[in-house]
Structure formats: C-alpha cells, structure tokens
C-alpha cells in the first residue's frame, strides 16, 4: 500500500497499483477509461520513466484507491477484452 492524496479518493488515502507499462498510448487510454467511470487515480513514475530513456527499466504506474481497486480492475479487464476483439 502507498499513502497518496488523490482528489475524490474515498477512504483513508491508501492506493494500490492497477496497471504498469511504458506504452504512453496504452496509459492514456487507461486514464480515459477510468475518467469515463469517475474512478480517481494517480500516475506514478511518469517523469522517471521519461528520464531513463528507452531501456524500459522504470515503468509508469496507475494507482487507484483501495475502495476502487476491484471495480477498476473489472472495468479495465472488460475494456481490454473489447480492445482485443476490435484488433482481431
């Protein structure tokens, strides 16, 4: 758990990792999915991943509140399945 301030976060302010990667398009898409459902989140390691260059040693992370984690995971899994179906 990480203690973090996110505007609109319910509960005590603890967040957990929802997703991590270095693909800026994928990260932007996930942010849009979460925003559409009004799930508060915070991005971690965005500046560090840019500074380290293209070796992909440090990935960006999307963190959501404990209370929203299960709902966010279900939403993300459902959205990823739809995305994969569109790619086929």
Image (tube, rainbow, N blue to C red):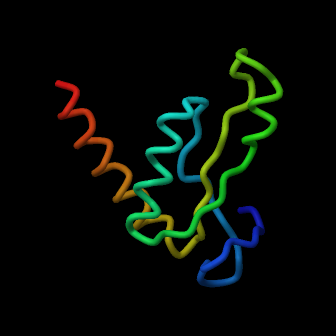
* Frontmost residue, 76 versus 8: 8
Q: Which quarter of the figure is the C terminus placed in?
A: top left
Q: Position of residue 37 (x, y in %)?
A: 39, 68
Location of residue 52 with respect to 60 vertically, above or below: above
* Frontmost residue, 28 versus 9: 28
Q: Give the side of residue 37 with respect to residue 17, left or right.
A: left
Q: Position of residue 73 (x, y in %)?
A: 42, 57
Q: Which quarter of the figure is the N terminus placed in?
A: bottom right
Q: Residue at x 60, y 80 (%)?
A: 8
Q: Residue at x 22, y 27 (%)?
A: 87
Location of residue 16 with respect to 84 vertically, above or below: below
Q: Give the side of residue 7 with respect to residue 2, left or right.
A: left
Q: Residue at x 35, y 58 (%)?
A: 74
Furthest residue toward bottom: 11
Furthest residue toward top: 55
Q: Residue at x 65, y 59 (%)?
A: 42
Q: Give the side of residue 51 with respect to residue 58, left or right.
A: right
Q: Position of residue 62 (x, y in %)?
A: 60, 51
The image quarter containing residue 36 is bottom left
Count of marks overlaid on the render: 0
């Amino acid at each position: 758990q990480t203690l973090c301030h996110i505007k609109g976060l319910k509960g005590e302010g603890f967040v957990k990792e929802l997703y991590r990667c270095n693909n800026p398009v994928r990260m932007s898409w996930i942010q849009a999915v979460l925003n559409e459902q009004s799930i508060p989140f915070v991005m971690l390691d965005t500046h560090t991943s840019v500074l380290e260059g293209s070796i992909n040693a440090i990935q960006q992370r999307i963190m959501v509140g404990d209370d929203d984690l299960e709902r966010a995971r279900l939403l993300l899994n459902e959205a990823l399945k739809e995305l994969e179906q569109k790619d086929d």
